[in-house]
């Protein structure tokens, strides 16, 4: 008998999981779905099957994928749990299974098991494979139409350690660049830099040493460089007994940005001092010679994680804002330029410009926000980074928008010509919708609203795959 879920802030409201898998043909649509939208939107996020038996964090729920298949204006939907070894064991045993691993009796270290993850953070299409990702594990493959779990990939077995949930696909070469952290064991300062070719074969998977062991969620590439920014959300196993978490924001350790020339050996990584802050996600980056521009959502400290004294960050410090960094590789200086003074997260862009100078960014934002909101972000905002102008669609305070995924109009369209796809949680009716926005006229509101009877719990990331 499945036990009730506890009354936990990250298991209430639209953080709460749904307890079914559904397949729905031909969803009801208000407005008109553009016929040129032909492909699938995938979204991934935590959706625990069973009540946790120990402490719970939003990042720790089993992955569930939601797929919207678009074809000639019609939209079909399905959702599936990812059949990780953990999830399969839970179904067999009828209760939550911990991934906690015992320390090696000889070394005292927690060995990594990179094929024992949650696959709950992102989902990307690369090398003709649909890959569910979490940063502590290797890529996990799903079938693109049925979402049938195929398991950890052969490519992944050739990687040295885990891979980030935020790989970058070079639009010119089709290569996938990724990294891993805490390679070998929890608390290891060893990181990895992975490159896969456009077919998904491993080109390189090289280990290097970070300044300290830390949680590293995302990174950036440019045409000529790869950057590994490391923020002081550090790991210390001994800390867990003192403050209840091995991770804490340790400002004294500072921010360090590893800079590597594309194609150079990892021994040539140069570390420069970065702004003291915390970043989950970057919007994009590019370089003009030895000047690098990075657009990022900056937090004052790591939200949802303790400081070294065990206290949680203040509410104000837990708001991320879009900031541009200007990195001068000649003298190692980093200058910060605030871009948008609105609480924001989940930055996306037209990924045909990944690593290149670009103009248009898209974020989930909350210009009106207070403690206890039922929605995390209620707006989708387009930022024209050349003019600084923004255009916003407001889904209504209390409703919650997901990350907006950009889909270009077919062949030849200029940057930013296309659509944004996002799910919206409606707190009054306790269901979700998928909205299709014209990316060049976000403030006009959805051109199509695709209706679901159920809600999609707050999740993390998603991608589009063209038919
Ligand atoms: Fe992320």
Image (spheres, grey):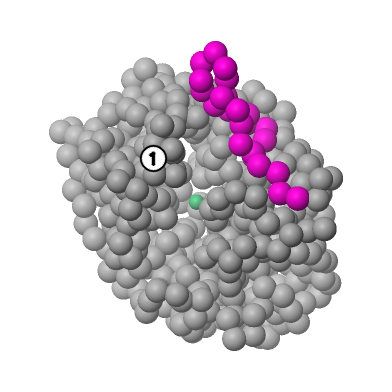
Q: Is residue 310 visible?
A: yes
- Is residue 108 within the magenta segment? yes
Q: Residue at (45%, 75%) from the top-left corner?
A: 372
Q: Residue furthest top?
A: 106
The image quadrant where one finds the N terminus is bottom right
392 left or right, relative to 139: left
Q: Residue at (62%, 55%) from the top-left corner?
A: 46
- Foreground pick, 144 / 286: 144
- Foreground pick, 139 / 97: 97
What range is drawn magenta here? 95-117
- Foreground pick, 362 / 10: 10
Q: Is residue 299 visible?
A: no
Q: Residue at (46%, 76%) from the top-left corner?
A: 373
Rendered view: 6 above or below 228: below
Q: Residue at (29%, 26%) from the top-left corner?
A: 270
**Dot 1: within a 10 Å radius of its alpha carbon, few (fewer than 14), some, or many (20 or more) residues?**
few
- Foreground pick, 387 / 236: 236
Q: Say which element carries label 1.
A: helix
The image quadrant where one finds the C terminus is bottom right
Rendered view: 428 above or below 136: below
- For label 1, being within 8 Å of ligand 1 is answered no
Residue 187, given in percent of the width and then of the height, sits at 45, 29
- Is residue 97 within the magenta segment? yes
Residue 202, given in percent of the width and then of the height, sits at 61, 26
| Image quadrant assignment for residue 103 | top right
Residue 409, given in percent of the width and then of the height, sits at 59, 65
Residue 95, given in percent of the width and then of the height, sits at 75, 50
Pointer 1 residue: 242
Majority SS type along the magenta span: loop
96 left or right, relative to 349: right
């Amino acid at each position: 008998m499945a036990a009730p879920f506890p009354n936990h802030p990250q298991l209430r409201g639209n953080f709460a999981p749904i307890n079914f898998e559904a397949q729905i043909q031909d969803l009801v649509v208000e407005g008109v779905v553009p016929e040129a939208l032909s492909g699938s939107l995938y979204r991934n996020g935590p959706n625990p099957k069973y009540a946790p038996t120990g402490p719970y964090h939003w990042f720790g729920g089993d992955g569930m994928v939601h797929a919207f298949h678009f074809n000639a204006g019609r939209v079909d939907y399905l959702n599936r749990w990812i059949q990780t070894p953990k999830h399969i064991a839970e179904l067999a045993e009828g209760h939550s299974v911990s991934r906690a691993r015992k320390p090696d009796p000889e070394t005292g270290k927690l060995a990594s098991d990179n094929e024992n993850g949650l696959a709950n953070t992102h989902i990307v299409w690369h090398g003709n494979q649909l890959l569910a990702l979490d940063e502590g594990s290797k890529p996990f493959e799903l079938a693109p139409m049925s979402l049938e779990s195929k398991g950890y990939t052969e490519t992944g077995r050739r990687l040295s350690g885990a891979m980030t949930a935020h790989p970058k696909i070079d639009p010119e070469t089709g290569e996938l660049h990724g990294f891993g952290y805490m390679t070998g064991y929890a608390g290891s300062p060893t990181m990895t830099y992975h490159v896969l070719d456009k077919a998904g074969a491993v080109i390189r998977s090289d280990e290097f040493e970070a300044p300290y062991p830390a949680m590293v969620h995302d990174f950036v590439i440019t045409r000529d460089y790869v950057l590994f920014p490391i923020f002081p959300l550090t790991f210390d196993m001994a800390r867990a007994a003192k403050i209840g978490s091995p991770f804490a924001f340790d400002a004294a350790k500072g921010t360090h940005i590893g800079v590597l020339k594309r194609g150079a050996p990892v021994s040539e990584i140069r570390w420069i001092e970065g702004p003291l802050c915390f970043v989950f996600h970057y919007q994009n980056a590019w370089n003009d010679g030895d000047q690098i521009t990075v657009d990022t959502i900056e937090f004052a400290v790591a939200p949802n994680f303790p400081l070294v004294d065990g206290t949680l960050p203040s509410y104000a410090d837990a708001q991320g804002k879009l900031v541009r960094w200007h990195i001068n590789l000649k003298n190692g200086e980093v200058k910060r330029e605030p871009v948008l003074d609105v609480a924001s997260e989940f930055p996306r862009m037209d990924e045909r410009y990944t690593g290149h100078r670009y103009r248009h960014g898209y974020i989930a934002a909350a210009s009106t926000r207070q403690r206890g909101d039922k929605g995390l972000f209620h707006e989708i905002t387009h930022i024209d980074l050349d003019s600084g102008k923004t255009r916003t669609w407001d889904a209504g305070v209390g409703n919650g928008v997901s990350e907006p995924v950009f889909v270009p109009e077919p062949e030849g369209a200029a940057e930013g010509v296309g659509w944004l796809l996002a799910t919206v949680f409606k707190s009054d009716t306790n269901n979700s919708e998928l909205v299709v926005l014209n990316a060049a006229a976000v403030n006009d509101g959805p051109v199509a609203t695709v209706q679901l009877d159920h809600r999609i719990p707050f999740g993390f990331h998603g991608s589009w795959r063209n038919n």
